[in-house]
Amino acid sequence: MRFNTRLRTTVSAVAFGAAFSIAGAAAAQDAPTSVDDIIVTAQKREQSLQEVPIVVTTLSQEALDGAGVKDIKDLQILTPGMTVTSTQSEASTTARIRGVGTVGDNPGLESSVGVVIDGVYRSRNSVGFGDLGELSRIEVLKGPQGTLFGKNTSAGVINIISEAPSFSPEANFEATVGNFGAWGVTGSVTGPLSDTVAGRLYVGTRKRDGFYDVVTGNGPRTETDDQNQDFWTARGQLLILPSENASIRLIADYTKRDEYCCVATQVRVGPTVGIVNALGGQIAPATPGFGEVPFSRTAYSNRGTGQTMEDMGLSAEANIDIPSWNATFTSVTSWRSWEGVNGMDLDYSTLDIMYRENNGGYGYSLDNVTQEFRLAGATDKLDWLFGVFATREQIRRDDSYYFGAHYTPFLSMLLSSSLNAANPAIPISPALTGCVTAPGATAAGIVGCVTGQTAPTGPGFGTGHAVQDLYTQTTQSVALFTNNTWRVTDKFDITLGLRYTMDEKKLRGLQTNVGTNGLACGSAIGNLTALATALGQGNPAAGMGAAQTIIGNMCLPWANPLYNNRRISESFDDGELSGTIKASYKFNDSVMLYGSYAKGYKSFGYNMDRVQTGITPNASLLFPSETVDSYEIGLKNTLFNRSVLLNLTYFDQTFEDFQLNTFLGTAFVVESIPELTSRGVDADFAWFTPVEGLVLSGGVTYTDTKYGDFTAADLTVPGNFPQLSLLPGARASFAPEWSTTASIAFDRSIGNGLQFGFNLTGKYMTEFNTGSDLLPYKMQDGFGVLNGRISLGSDTDRWVLELWGQNITDTEYKQVAINQPLQGSAFQTTVQPDGSFYNPARDTQTYAAFLGQPRTYGLTLRLRY
């Protein structure tokens, strides 16, 4: 019984994949001719797509192969309204749906878009970045899905279903070569081990050179490229059928990555380039007037960016049919362990200013166990489901900073240049730090030292290891949930879902300054009055503002003695009721109207970083839970003799306490934005044309995603407002107004035992800002990406040879733009004429960006036996 069900599911998934992007290498007899067999499990049971009152985009393995999808970042080309980005590490992967998502650089923050793989919830998007292996299909569910998929799915879910073991013996082999030195080999076998046990084993490895050329200066970095690929993965499964009414699926997987990633390239170079050059370093050359620089994949980094990641897990899913109840009992148990370690050049230049070693001192690990029980059944009038979910998760984050030989002179020249701009009598000097930190300094002594009359005698910042912090967060969560559909009439259904979640989190931390780190800051604080008197030309009140600015820059979080052996101990628990109510009405077999309301919930958490206001560490690192109220009304149409699918949905979502993870120039900080609204329309289309093997499909998402109006008093930490002052009333980052996808797929027999196919898949997005602070230099103009492939193979699927290309037009675009640390300032300390703290005329910031992938191309050979 279970075996037959799985076979039916696989056939349906293939049909849906062809409909929504690609026939790929599917045999001609498997190509669908209508939408009736498109099956999804968006409500934890098999249902026809056109009967589910949810916006769902589903793609089979053939669909993903046709568009060149290997991981969730590639998946966005097939899904309108979805973006996936990564920044300083591939572990910092962030998925967004309808302009809503959560930046992944802070491991204390769970994502608004949940990733579920074979029924197992993954609490961080980074776990879905690796090779996903052999897939039955992927379902992208838009809008809150907390009732059935958990508490942290307030924006949507990426539901990944892998190919299960089969009792029909089969072996697959794939070999790929491409530009940038790319090559990959994967293989799998499946078949019966006995009359009641089937197995499947998948292994694969992929390698590729980096997309960036790196100028290393004096090193010690030796790699001259960056963002390479080098990993292997294995996945083993057993399907056990102990009886006619029971099945057990066991899965074990392991992935290891050993790569170097990620450098960033300058997109705008500010006035601090003069200091970089004066100290013998390099970044991209500035343009006249310090405007944007030409697009380039040349990066500057003297320190290594090595990253290693290890991901492993076990899961067991048991299904037991209870015929007397017409019900099925399901148990899903999992254990997972993920660890990532990074090296990083923090200044993105060839100067040796700040860095992190790839020695285990910077990275994080995540271990969790989950257990879910569900009991689902049906009567003539009611589909019912009850369940319980529990998880225990532990996160460990290690953070470290190293000062290079250029940190002290660079910071001295940076601060003295700002003083020189106000008072030309003060020279730009690499010795400012030692003048300000001299023991018992007087105003006259500081003036004499800064002007070169006496030598600096105070401490600088030293070189080498300066910071080593450790954070651990333990989470325990239990939820009770139910989802029930009442068939009021043959045409009218009502669905009610409820979930109550109870969360408890504990944070423990130890923040440590290594050696004499913090001495320069502490000494400067002791000389504050003398410095203010010197800058105020004898009047300390007149010079206090400038003096505090200098002290603030000398007491940045990584150099602040107030963190020396600082222990953190916090705990919090909370409960939240979420749920949904949906109503659908079928006018006939071809048209269904539905409306829904859903309340979503994303748990509170802790900033695992050094977070301070001024130079005072924040007393608490807690940020509150995020909630969303979502309304949808949709129309699902199956037209022209079941050959055309046309679905339209209007959505209106309001998020409260939206968890915005933003980089303040010194740390990643989660700040709760009081309100974010996302309104718009989703449309999906597929046409099984009269031409044999030809399918056209596409989708459009229009979004108007904006922040509500707020002031500093509305924030958890009012001192964060200056860096967020461009947000009130503005369009959110990564929220293009229009996002469109389109594809044409053709696959048919051409005689002589041969099959020919081609696929062209494209996506276009209008302009959007790539920075959470919405600074203008972080805007990305509208752009499109086009993927394609041509295939020739046997009409029995024994072999297929594909010529493929990704980003065929070599479109140049930014993934994410950032403020390059210590290289100028964008936001001012006082309110500007427009009411924000930003003034473009006073923006001295150097900006860098993590870029989208360039054009890649190659050949793939697939063999099947």
Image (cartoon, rainbow, N blue to C red):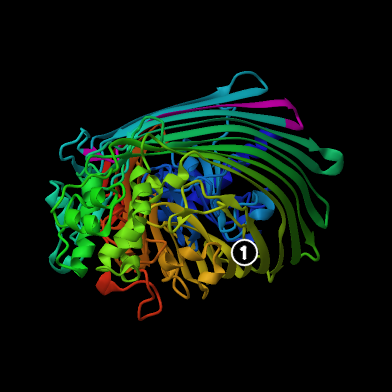
Asked whether 701 or 136 is in front, the reply is 701
Per the image, is 231 magenta? yes
Q: How many marks?
A: 1
Which quadrant of the figure contains the N terminus? top right
Measured from the top left, where is residue 169 in percent x and y? 53, 25
Q: Give the residue drawn at x 34%, y 66%.
A: 544
**Where is residue 142, by image quadrant?**
bottom right
Q: Is residue 200 left or right of residue 600?
A: left
Above or below for 783 versus 692: below
The kind of residue tagged 1 is Val
**Is residue 173 visible in the rendered structure shown here?**
no
Vertically, is 808 above or below 184? Answer: below
In depth, the one of 425 and 490 nearer the eye is 425
Which residue is labeled 1 in the image?
A: 628
State the image coordinates of residue 408 (x, y, percent, origin top left): 25, 46
The magenta span reads 225-246
Label 1 crowd bin: few (<14), some (14–19), many (20+), radius 10 Å: many
